[in-house]
Amino acid sequence: MDIADAGREVKKELSSDEKVLESVFKLETLYKKYKFLIWTVAIGLVAYFIGSNVMKSMHEQSLEEANKAFLTLQENDSDTQALAILKEKNIALYDLFTFSKASKDEDTKTLATLENSTNKVIADLSKYTVAGLENKSSDSVLHKEMAILQEAYLAMKSGDSKSAIAKLELITENSPLAQIATLLKHSTLTAK
């Protein structure tokens, strides 16, 4: 290697070192200019991840306590402390337990209060169950065909066969309740 080639190599290395130093100075200038913003974003990200992990942990602990209370209530449904914990920690599970107990005990007062539940399934089931216990018709969304059967039965019981048949016609042939509806139609015909 001759001196001219060695000189070019040294010049290339110095040129690349200059570029690295130039980049470092640009980064330092940017850092000084946006130091507050960079630290704010970094601290915000750290706080977000710590906060989300803490919230997740608290939520899991709350669900665990609610599940323990629910299991306790399944063994002893008169445990007021477990009932209070369940109501505080998981209102949907509390509504489900209350509905189950009220249905079993045929407690129409409690079922009537559950008709206002935020859980639409529990509210609808409560409405339907109260109507069934009080021998009234229901406008249940989830048990629409069962409610129609109930209305037809009540019409038959009161002697209104035409209304009962009209109600039973609302149940389609592919419904799981179609056979029961057909049997009820035949019983209205023989009752004439």
Image: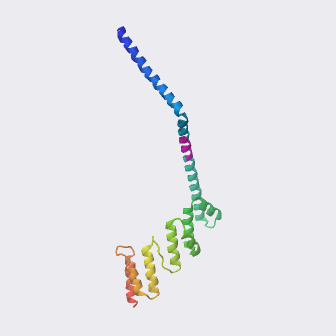
Judged from this view, the residue extending furthest toward the bottom is: 192
Tell me if residue 190 is in the magenta stretch.
Answer: no
Magenta segment: 44-51
Q: In the visual, does 112 lie left or right of 164?
A: right
* Picture layout, residue 160 above or below residue 9: below
* Picture layout, residue 169 above or below residue 48: below
Q: In the visual, does 78 lie left or right of 164?
A: right
> Exactly how many numbered labels are in the figure?
0
Residue at x 46% of width, y 23% of height: 22
Residue at x 45% of width, y 76% of height: 147
Colour basis: rainbow
Quarter of the image with the N terminus in it = top left
Location of residue 112 by image quarter: bottom right
* Picture layout, residue 78 above or below residue 7: below
Residue 47 is situated, as x and y percent measured from the top left of the image, at 56, 43
Location of residue 7 by image quarter: top left
Foreground pick, 13 / 130: 13
Tell me if residue 47 is in the magenta stretch.
Answer: yes
Residue at x 56% of width, y 49% of height: 55
Quarter of the image with the C terminus in it = bottom left
Q: In the visual, does 73 lie left or right of 147?
A: right
Residue 43 is situated, as x and y percent measured from the top left of the image, at 56, 39
Location of residue 98 by image quarter: bottom right
Foreground pick, 25 / 137: 25
Residue 59 is situated, as x and y percent measured from the top left of the image, at 56, 53
Foreground pick, 128 / 64: 128
Residue 16 is situated, as x and y percent measured from the top left of the image, at 41, 20
Judged from this view, the residue extending furthest toward the top is: 3
Residue at x 53% of width, y 36% of height: 38
Which SS type dominates the magenta stretch?
helix
